[in-house]
Image (spheres, helix red, strand yellow):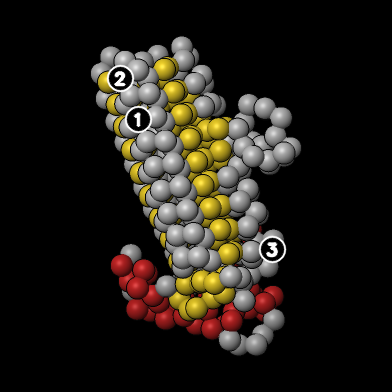
């Protein structure tokens, strides 16, 4: 079903069972295959390929040569009808690739809203990306990676399969992330190592001074106190009762399986 207000270039190829919402724009030489749904106000430039099952929300902008919803590069993938879901108001720049999930996980790759994916960024199968993240040029996620909200991943950086990247963290360019990155951190390097708290980013997002001090204390407890991590985890659970923002650490540790960067 194609809404009557949609603008589709005559050279675009659209399968019969595609749903296209109001005021969608699809540019020249795009290919939209079956079982794709595109939300209202989304603009797709030229030479974009979208395969289903894929759902794209409202007011996204997808630039030329992006490949959205392609079958993944995992050798276990055998053509099963897994999904890609993309939220609203994302900017997906040139040559970005986002692959569907695998049945070995939840069969779903999911991207949130208000993200910026710069040129040639790659979101692999079964990844979950939160909201308001920035992926710089050539930032790459391996399969099954979980990225929180407000995360910045610098150019030419790669995140290993199954890693967790906590919310409000910032990974510098050219990094190789092979273990989990706790929330609120700045990290960089090959292999990626912590370099303190992302204070400037947190200030821009409105964190007050008492909360910033609490996050700094949590960072010091994890990385500088010399105590066992299990002991620090129990302390953070108690501190989160006064500072709810610290509960991101508790949620992170509940997901973490690869150990944290050091």
Q: Earlier in the sequence, mark 1 or mark 3?
A: 1
Eye-nearest disc, 1 or 3: 1
Eye-nearest disc, 2 or 3: 2
Would you call the spot at circle 3 few (<14 residues within 10 Å), some (14-19), or many (20 or more)?
some
Q: Position of residue 87 (x, y in %)?
A: 42, 39
- Residue identified by numbered label 1: 46
Q: Position of residue 39 (x, y in %)?
A: 37, 29
Q: Residue at x 66, y 37 (%)?
A: 102
In the rendered view, would you say 230 is above or below 8? Answer: below
Q: Position of residue 2 (x, y in %)?
A: 36, 15
Q: Position of residue 68 (x, y in %)?
A: 48, 34
Q: Earlier in the sequence, mark 2 or mark 1?
A: 2
Labelled pair 2, 1 in contact (Cβ < 8 Å): yes
Query: Going by the image, does 151 lie left or right of 25?
Result: right
Q: Which mark is residue 258?
A: 3
Query: Going by the image, does 9 lie left or right of 57?
Result: left
Q: Residue at x 32, y 26 (%)?
A: 27
Tell me the distance, in whole angstroms, between the alpha carbons under discs 1 and 3. Answer: 40 Å
- If the image is split into quadrants, where does the N terminus sit? top left
In the rendered view, would you say 181 is above or below 140? Answer: below
- Residue identified by numbered label 2: 9
Which secondary structure, mark 1?
loop
Which secondary structure, mark 3?
loop
Would you call the spot at circle 1 few (<14 residues within 10 Å), some (14-19), or many (20 or more)?
many
For residue 108, say whether it is visible. Answer: no
- If the image is split into quadrants, where does the C terminus sit? bottom right
User: Given the current orientation, which residue lies at the most extreme top position?
Assistant: 16
């Amino acid at each position: 079903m194609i809404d009557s207000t949609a603008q589709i270039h005559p050279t675009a190829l659209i399968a019969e069972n595609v749903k296209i919402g109001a005021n969608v724009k699809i540019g020249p030489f795009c290919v939209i295959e079956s079982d794709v749904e595109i939300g209202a106000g989304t603009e797709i430039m030229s030479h974009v390929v979208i395969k289903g099952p894929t759902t794209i929300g409202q007011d996204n902008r997808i630039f030329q040569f992006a490949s959205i919803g392609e079958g993944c590069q995992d050798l276990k993938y055998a053509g099963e009808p897994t999904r890609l879901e993309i939220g609203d108001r994302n900017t997906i720049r040139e040559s970005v690739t986002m692959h569907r999930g695998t049945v070995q996980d939840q069969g779903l790759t999911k991207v949130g809203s208000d993200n910026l994916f710069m040129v040639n960024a790659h979101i692999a199968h079964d990844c979950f990306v939160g909201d308001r993240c920035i992926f710089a040029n050539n930032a790459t996620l391996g399969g099954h990676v979980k990225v929180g909200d407000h995360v910045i991943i610098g150019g030419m950086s790669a995140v290993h399969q199954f890693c967790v990247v906590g919310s409000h963290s910032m990974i510098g360019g050219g990094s190789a992330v092979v273990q989990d990155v706790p929330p609120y951190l700045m990290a960089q390097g090959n292999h990626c190592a912590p370099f303190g708290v992302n204070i400037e980013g947190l200030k821009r997002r409105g964190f007050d001074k008492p909360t910033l001090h609490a996050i700094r204390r949590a960072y010091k407890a994890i990385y500088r106190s010399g105590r066992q991590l299990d002991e620090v985890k129990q302390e953070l659970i108690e501190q989160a009762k006064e500072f709810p923002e610290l509960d991101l650490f508790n949620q992170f540790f509940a997901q973490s399986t690869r150990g944290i960067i050091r």
